[in-house]
Amino acid sequence: MPQYRHLQEIMPDDAFDEQTLQTLCRQHGFDLPGEVLKKLAAYLELLHKWNRAFNLVGQKSRQDILEDLALDSFHLAGFLNSLNLPAHPECWDFGAGAGIPGIPLRMVWTRGIYTMVEAREKRALFLQNALAACGISTGATRVYRGRAEEFMAERPSSASLPGAKTADLLLSRAFMPWRKFLEFVQGKTTAQGLAVCLTLEETPQNYTPGGQTAGETARWELVASRRYSPSSLHPQKTRYFQAFRQNSVTSG
C-alpha cells in the first residue's frame, strides 16, 4: 500500500517527534489528542531506552513497539468502553511487564483504580518510571511488585464489598493462556465483574474448567468479543479481546 512507507522512512530510530507519531497513529485509525501524543512519545522513548539494557520486549525499533504492542492498548480502550462496567471499576492487570496494555491504556481510559501486577523487579521499576515520565496519576494507576497470588491474597477488601478481595475487571494480555487464566482467577471477580483476555483465537461461548462433572453449568460465559488487526500494515493478522463473566455452578 503506497501510503505506508518503510518504518525507517516514517520513524527513524534516532528521532521520535509528536507530529510523526500522530501521522502514524492516524494511519492506524487513532486520532489522538496532543496531550496523549506527548505521553505516548515519552513512554515509547523510555521503553526504547530501557529495552537496550534490560530487553523488556522483543521489538527493537520504536515503530515496531508502537505497532506490535502499544496500539493494542487503544483497541482495548474501545472494547472496555463497550462493556457494562461500573463507573469507577477496580481493575487488576496481571503480568504487566513493560506496561502493555496498562501504560498507553491509562492515557485514554482513566476510569477507576488500575493496578499493574508485576513480579519481576526490573519491570516493576520500569513501570514506576513510566508512570512518572508520562505524568499518569499514581493515585488511580498503581504498580504492585510481587506475584499475582500474593497480590490477590494481600489486596485490601473493598469498602463496598467487605471481606471480598475481588475486582470488576481482570486483565491478561500475555500473563498466561486464557484457559489457565480463567482457572487462576476463579472467584476473584465481583458479581458482574469481567475477565478480559487478549487471544489469537476465537473462544467458545462457554468454558468449563477441569474438575467439573457433566450436568454442571459453565463457570465462565463469553459475554463480549472483538476481533481486530493490530496493524493496518498487516490486516491479515488478527487478534481478539474476549470478555468472560463467571457463572454460579449448578447441577443440571
Image: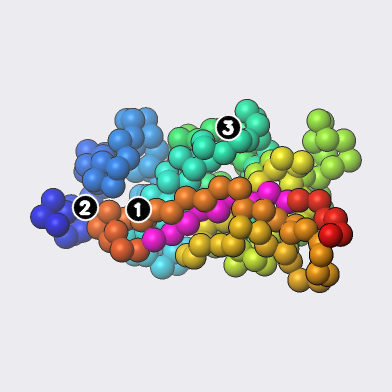
Quarter holding the N terminus? bottom left
Seen at 72% across and 40% down, the residue is: 192
Position of 106 with respect to 206 (left or right) is: left
Name the residue nearer the viewer: 136 or 94. 94
Q: Is residue 202 left or right of residue 191?
A: left
Q: Earlier in the sequence, mark 3 or mark 2?
A: 2
Which amino acid, mark 1? Answer: Leu
Q: Which of the 4 image quarters holds residue 230?
A: bottom left
Answer left or right for 35 relative to 245. left
Mark 2: secondary structure:
loop
Q: Residue at x 39, y 53 (%)?
A: 228
Name the amino acid type tagged 2: Met
Q: Which residues are magenta?
A: 238-246
Q: Position of residue 27 (x, y in %)?
A: 24, 45
Q: Quadrant of residue 183?
A: bottom right
Label 1, label 2: how far apart the Cα atoms are = 11 Å
Q: Which mark is residue 11?
A: 2
Task: Give the Cα distance between marks 1 and 3.
Answer: 23 Å
Residue 75 is situated, as x and y percent measured from the top left of the image, at 43, 46
Residue bearing the label numbered 1:
66
* Secondary structure state at the residue bearing disc 1: helix
Residue matched to label 3: 111
Q: Label 3 is placed on what type of residue? A: Arg
- Residue that lies at the very extreme toward the top in this rendered image: 87
**Disc 1 + disc 2, Cβ < 8 Å:** yes
**Direction from residue 81 to residue 84 in the image, left or right:** right
Q: Is residue 47 magenta?
A: no
Q: Residues within 10 Å of mark 1 (few under 14, many from 20)?
A: many
Residue nearest the observer in this picture, 197 or 216: 216
